[in-house]
Amino acid sequence: MAKHVAQEESEAAKVLGELATRVESDKVDEFTLSRLEKLAASSKDRDWINYIYVMGAISAIRNDVDAVRKYYTQALDVEGNTFKTRFNFAQSLALVGKFAEAYVQAKAAETISPTSEHITGLMKNISAKMLDEMWKDMKEDTEEDLTRMCMMNFAAGEK
């Protein structure tokens, strides 16, 4: 997991960095998540947006897709269409395996900041995961399933 992008160095912002480091080293457990959640909550009133980013990231680590969407939708509603929110939303969605949604959020972030190295790497990672997922799905399909899909695509193209 690449680091989520924090607004500034508050307690919640520090927690984002620690979360990313722990996920990369596979040292995340529920006790740690609860501790980090409490740390971030201590700066909720002073640094609401980073608190929301932390909660979105923790929700992703807990594999709670609905909570991920809830937190980042709140961030978009309050902060507007910012690179940091779109990037972090994409990161969290990718972490829970929602690659198509993650790609949409990453594209939105890229539109805001097209030269960001962070977004370029994230989009490559998401695209690779989507491709892997597609091939995995195709390997599980029968020849009949694949033929039916090809015929449906062919018929759709004729209209």
Image (cartoon, rainbow, N blue to C red):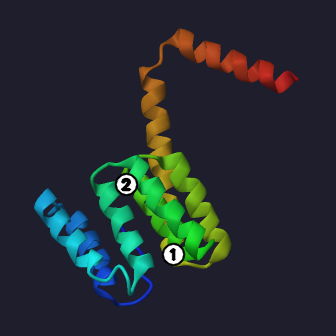
Q: Quadrant of the N terminus?
A: bottom left
Picture quadrant where residue 77 is located: bottom right
The relative height of residue 69 versus residue 87 in the rendered view (above or below) is: above
Ranked by sequence position, the earlier of labels 1 and 2 is 1
- Tell me if I can see residue 143 in this picture: yes
Secondary structure of residue under mark 2:
helix
For this rendering, which residue is in front, 32 or 39? 39
Q: Is residue 157 left or right of residue 89?
A: right
Q: Which callout, 1 or 2, points to the residue nearer the camera?
A: 1
For this rendering, which residue is in front, 33 or 2? 33
Q: What residue type is disc 2 on?
A: Leu
Residue sitting at x 31%, y 75% = 16
**Mark 2: few/some/many CA within 10 Å (<14, 14-19, 20+):** many
Q: Which residue is mark 1?
A: 84
Q: Which residue is mark 2?
A: 95
Q: What residue type is disc 1 on?
A: Lys
The relative height of residue 94 versus residue 10 in the rendered view (above or below) is: above
Residue sitting at x 46%, y 67% = 88
Residue at the extreme left: 31
Residue 92, how many percent across, how many down? Answer: 41, 59
The relative height of residue 45 versus residue 59 in the rendered view (above or below) is: below
Q: Quadrant of the C terminus?
A: top right
Residue 74, how many percent across, how many down? Answer: 51, 64
